[in-house]
Image (tube, rainbow, N blue to C red):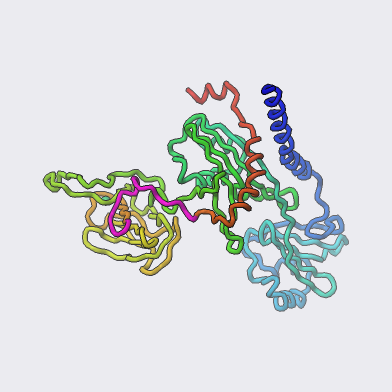
Amino acid sequence: MKLYLGLILSFLLLASCKDSGSSDKDMAEVATITKPIVIKQFGFNLDDFTVLQDTVRNGDSFGELMLRNKVEYPKIYKISEEFRDTFDVRKIVVGKPYLILKSKDTLEKAQVFIYQNDLINYTVIDLRDSVTAYNKRNKIKYVQREASGVITSSLSEAILEQGIDYNITNNLSQIYAWTIDFFRLQKGDKFKVIYKEKYINDSIYAGAEPIEAAYFEHNGKTIYSFGYETDTVNKVKDYFDEQAKNLRRAFLKAPVEFSRISSRYNLNRRIAYYGYKVRPHKGTDYAAPIGTPILATANGTVEESTRRGGNGKYVKIKHNGTYSTQYLHMKNQNVRKGQYVKQGDVIGWIGMTGNTGGPHVCYRFWKNGHQVDPLREELPTAEPLSDALKPDYYAFISPLKEQLDCIEFMELPEEDLLTENQ
Ligand SMILES: [Zn+2]
């Protein structure tokens, strides 16, 4: 009986996984759409015209382009004066693509001018009869993609190998910045991601959107993450796990990216320079080259930004009633007293001002007025999901989690694994 139940369960699981494979179909559709010759573009049947396609070159002006294509001067003047709100002819930019649709007769007189502001927005100036000008947008299509990988050397390699957008690597390491040490990834760590790709007019690839949901397996620990908008008005999106816990912490692990700790918080430190007397070190030193950006480890208000004695140039930020952080020996500060800063903002640069033997930032962590060791503190998580939002959140992630669970890992062939080992 037990075996029978097990069989049914696994069948159901398989069945639900097969259903969710529809995103592959969407991709195939997009791939086939790329090929056919596009005749109708920008709302015009290009077959009706002689088409000149070019980019704005150095020295080109709108007037000149028009004169070259037989548009009379009064018309050019009218466009430059009357349509400024829609299209300012003085602002055409070198390198931007444009199209001129000319009459198919021997005269080859310009009928329509199409200026491409960017991949999505374009301006049409219809020169026929009384001139009209308008701005339009290309159609955007989002296609959901699933991807997975097993890490053999690095995360970025595992992602690039599969032709996944490189932004996904950054995005993944941002989402898991607090929960996984990306410098310590191990062979065999695994990930899965669900994200959307953007296409213009069904065919032109225009990048990846932020990750919708992900799964990371590191050192036997598994962490799910789901992007969820906690503030629909300000479009604030955070990542939470399957238990609605925020994956972000209120504090960054360190105020400098890619640095090394040169001296830890140590109340019993003895230094030769001071005759081996106890000189407590109430900060954590992060060594990095001069000029390296120093980041605010949490949101807060700048309480001090000044220069004083051994501290040199420093910044102190008050985060709330409990926590403040301080950053010493800066080359220069980038913030003023009273200014509000967000987590990750550059507040200054690594320097050697004050008492220091080499370029580093001395990071001091204040809790209730005392300096403590942040590396030993259980740091608070960032804004938790409110109880009011939880039912909606669970409903939102349920299908995404099922979809993640159904993604299979792309295993490399044995030979590849062998060469990786050498
Ligand atoms: Zn220090």
Quadrant containing the N terminus in the rendered view: top right
Q: Indicate the position of residue 413 as horizontal and vertical percent values.
A: 60, 24
Residue 124: image location, x then y, percent: 75, 66
384 w.r.t. 192: above or below = below
Q: Which x, y percent locates residue 149? A: 58, 34
- Residue drawn at x 83%, y 70% is 128
Q: How many numbered callouts?
A: 0
Q: Is residue 9 visible?
A: yes
Q: Quadrant of residue 48?
A: bottom right
User: Is 65 above or below relative to 399?
Assistant: below
| Image side of residue 95 versus residue 256, left or right | right
240 is within the stretch colored magenta: no
- Residue that lies at the very extreme toward the left in this rendered image: 275
Q: Residue at x 41, y 67 (%)?
A: 339
Q: In this image, 122 relative to 173: left or right?
A: right
Q: Does 176 appear above or below 122?
A: above
Q: Residue at x 26, y 49 (%)?
A: 358
The percent position of residue 192, horizontal first and vertical second, equals 59, 38
Residue 359 visible from this viewpoint:
no
Q: Is residue 420 above or below residue 37?
A: above
The one of 250 and 5 positioned closer to us in this rendering: 5
Most extreme residue toward the front is 1
- Residue at position x 51%, y 32% in the image: 189
15, 22: nearer the viewer: 15
Residue 373 drawn in magenta: yes
Q: Which is more toward the observer, 110 or 318?
A: 318
Q: Quadrant of residue 172?
A: top right
Taking depth in this image into account, of 52 and 4 the one nearest to the observer is 4
Q: Which residues are magenta?
A: 367-383
Q: Give left or right: position of 5 versus 158.
A: right
